[in-house]
Image (tube, grey):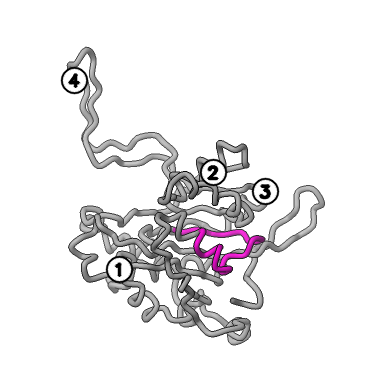
């Protein structure tokens, strides 16, 4: 791995001292993307083109992380991983240092991908992880979220957005009669946007989930387990642009002009990696697997 990881600075509320916390970016990018078929018969779902320049979706994710100082990134890859590795290589031209963890097919789900990287030693037991779902495009202030997570000493912090537009009509009924109908309303909930901070120290205890079932999901299993066992889990409310590109219908409705506008201030020059930073890599880019 690397000799060091980039960190974020924060003020310790107890001592008033400025401290630094190591951050390890984790991008979930191994899924088959069945809801995006037939596109994903040919593309890894994170590599579908978006924006007027038709750059891969995953490039926007990498640039966002690097822009906010999360430059040490591991991509958890599986299906059509060659497309990702060949495009991003070691990440230097995108302002990052990237390596790859190849999913173990004997353990399923996003939680399985995460714990596989932990077992391989790619994820260390003393890191703060910034976990980002690779089919989400967003301009969330990651530095702000990570700062809040560190200050509150959370086991996990979930990025949420106020309000969510559902894709179906909603009926209000009384004794079986529809008294109000709203087509595709925005409901007033705190919707998860597929971004979270997680302390890697909690992963060892999550292995018990695999003794209960073989398909473990980060948001569906690991986060509820943390909450149910009394670990401190917080939310970070954001009003930033975000969009789930996880289905063919959602992809068709994505406004490329909106993507361009949202990312107009995030240019490659803003996230360039210096020669000194590049030399911090102890080994070349690598793809690590159980075999």
- Give the CA separation, mark 1 to mark 2: 30 Å
Residue farthest to the right, as pictured: 15
N-terminal of the two: label 1 or label 4? Answer: 1
Which residue position is annotated with label 1? 44
Which residue position is annotated with label 2? 235
Q: Contact (CB < 8 A) between labels 1 and 2?
A: no
Q: Give the x, y percent position of residue 200.
A: 60, 57
Q: Tell me the SS state at disc 2.
A: strand
Is residue 238 shown above or below 96? Answer: above
N-terminal of the two: label 4 or label 3? Answer: 3
Q: Nearer the viewer, mark 1 or mark 3?
A: 1
Find residue 8 and report its image quarter.
bottom right
Q: Nearer the viewer, mark 1 or mark 2?
A: 1
Which residue position is annotated with label 3? 153
N-terminal of the two: label 1 or label 3? Answer: 1
- Give the CA separation, mark 1 to mark 4: 43 Å
- Give the CA separation, mark 3 to mark 2: 12 Å
Q: Give the x, y percent position of residue 17.
A: 79, 57
Find residue 235 and report its image quarter.
top right
Q: Nearer the viewer, mark 1 or mark 4?
A: 1
The residue drawn where x is 22% and y is 38% is 168
Q: Contact (CB < 8 A) between labels 4 and 3?
A: no
The one nearer the camera, 251 or 40, is 40
The residue drawn where x is 43% and y is 46% is 213
Q: Give the x, y percent position of residue 138.
A: 41, 58
- Give the CA separation, mark 4 to mark 3: 47 Å
Q: Which stretch did the figure color magenta?
A: 115-132
Is residue 277 shown above or below 251? Answer: below
């Amino acid at each position: 791995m690397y000799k060091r990881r980039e960190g974020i600075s924060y003020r310790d509320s107890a001592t008033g001292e400025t401290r630094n916390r190591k951050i390890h970016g984790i991008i979930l990018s191994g899924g088959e993307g069945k809801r995006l078929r037939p596109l994903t018969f040919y593309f890894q779902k994170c590599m579908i083109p978006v924006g007027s320049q038709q750059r891969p979706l995953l490039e926007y994710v990498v640039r966002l992380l690097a822009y906010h100082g999360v430059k040490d990134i591991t991509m958890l890859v599986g299906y059509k991983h060659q497309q990702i590795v060949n495009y991003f290589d070691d990440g230097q031209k995108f302002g990052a240092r990237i390596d790859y963890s190849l999913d173990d097919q004997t353990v399923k789900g996003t939680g399985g991908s995460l714990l596989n990287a932990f077992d391989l030693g790619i994820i260390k037991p003393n890191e703060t992880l910034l976990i980002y779902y690779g089919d989400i495009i967003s301009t969330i202030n990651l530095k702000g979220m990570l700062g809040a997570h560190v200050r509150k000493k959370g086991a996990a912090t979930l990025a949420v957005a106020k309000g969510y537009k559902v894709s179906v009509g909603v009926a209000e009924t009384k004794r079986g009669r529809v008294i109000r109908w709203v087509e595709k309303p925005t409901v007033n909930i705190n919707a998860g946007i597929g971004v979270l901070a997680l302390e890697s120290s909690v992963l060892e205890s999550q292995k018990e989930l695999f003794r209960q079932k073989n398909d473990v999901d980060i948001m569906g299993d690991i986060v509820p387990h943390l909450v149910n066992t009394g670990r401190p889990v917080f939310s970070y409310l954001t009003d930033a642009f975000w969009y789930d590109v996880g289905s063919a219908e959602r992809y068709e409705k994505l406004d490329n002009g909106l993507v361009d506008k949202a990312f107009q201030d995030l240019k490659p020059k803003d996230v360039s990696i210096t020669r000194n930073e590049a030399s911090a890599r102890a080994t070349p880019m690598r793809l690590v697997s159980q075999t």
